[in-house]
Image (cartoon, rainbow, N blue to C red):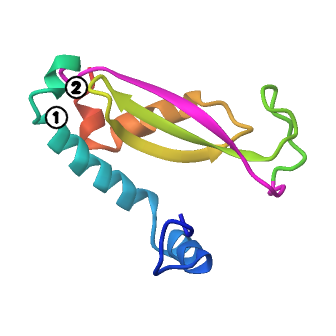
Amino acid sequence: MAEASNSHGYWQLQRNSQWHIVSDAINRALAIVIEAQSELPMAHIWGLGETASNDGQFFPTTRHGEAMNLINAKYGIDPGIKAYTHVSDQFGPFASQKIPATVNEAPFILDGLLTTDAGRKIK
């Protein structure tokens, strides 16, 4: 990202991401985008926005964190984090959260459905 920007360096973007980008703001922004997308005629070709899918995506990190003594059956001892994303049948991600790579994803299924307006439309 820093290489794509002429006006902001790596450290400025790092600071902004740590202090100004929070999950609540991202989820509110996603809700606005998903609401606008659901109004488009093409979105109704894919679905009505009443069903969803969710999955965790593992991203490796360079340093060991607090849970470096824990071993994940799928990823071993490699350090990393999961981005757990909920996607509607209109192919719009309506909720995203980061979770530790060493935990099961099942407890996080309801979080995205219950904490967003788009998630509450899911049947």
Going by the numbered disc 2, the residue's amino acid type is Gly
Question: How crowded is the residue under tag 1: few (<14 C-alpha within 10 Å), some, or many (20+)?
Answer: some
The answer to which of 32 and 113 lies nearer the viewer is: 32
Left or right relative to 114: residue 99: right
Dot 1 lies on which element? helix
Between tags 1 and 2, which lies in front? 1
Q: Are marks 1 and 2 in contact (CB under 8 Å)?
A: yes
How far across and down, in percent of the image, does residue 93 sit?
Answer: 36, 37
Q: Examine the rendering and report whether any part of residue 47 can be seen.
A: no
How far across and down, in percent of the image, does residue 30 sit?
Answer: 31, 49
Quick one: quadrant of the C terminus? top left
Mark 1 or mark 2: whose residue is earlier in sequence: 1
How far is mark 1 from mark 2, CA to CA? 7 Å
Circle 1 sits on which residue?
38
Left or right relative to 122: residue 74: right
Residue 77, magenta (yes or no): no
41 relative to 65, above or below = above
How far across and down, in percent of the image, does residue 9 sit?
Answer: 56, 79
The answer to which of 113 and 59 lies nearer the viewer is: 59
Circle 2 sits on which residue?
49
Q: Residue placed at 86% from the left, 36% from the top?
A: 71
Counting every numbered tag in the picture gives 2
- Magenta region, residue range: 47-66
How far across and down, in percent of the image, does residue 34 sit?
Answer: 24, 41
Dot 2 lies on which element? loop
Going by the numbered disc 1, the residue's amino acid type is Ser
77 relative to 16, above or below = above
Q: Residue placed at 30% from the left, 20% from the top?
A: 51
Q: Residue placed at 26% from the left, 26% from the top?
A: 90
Q: Residue placed at 15% from the left, 26% from the top?
A: 42
Residue 61, magenta (yes or no): yes
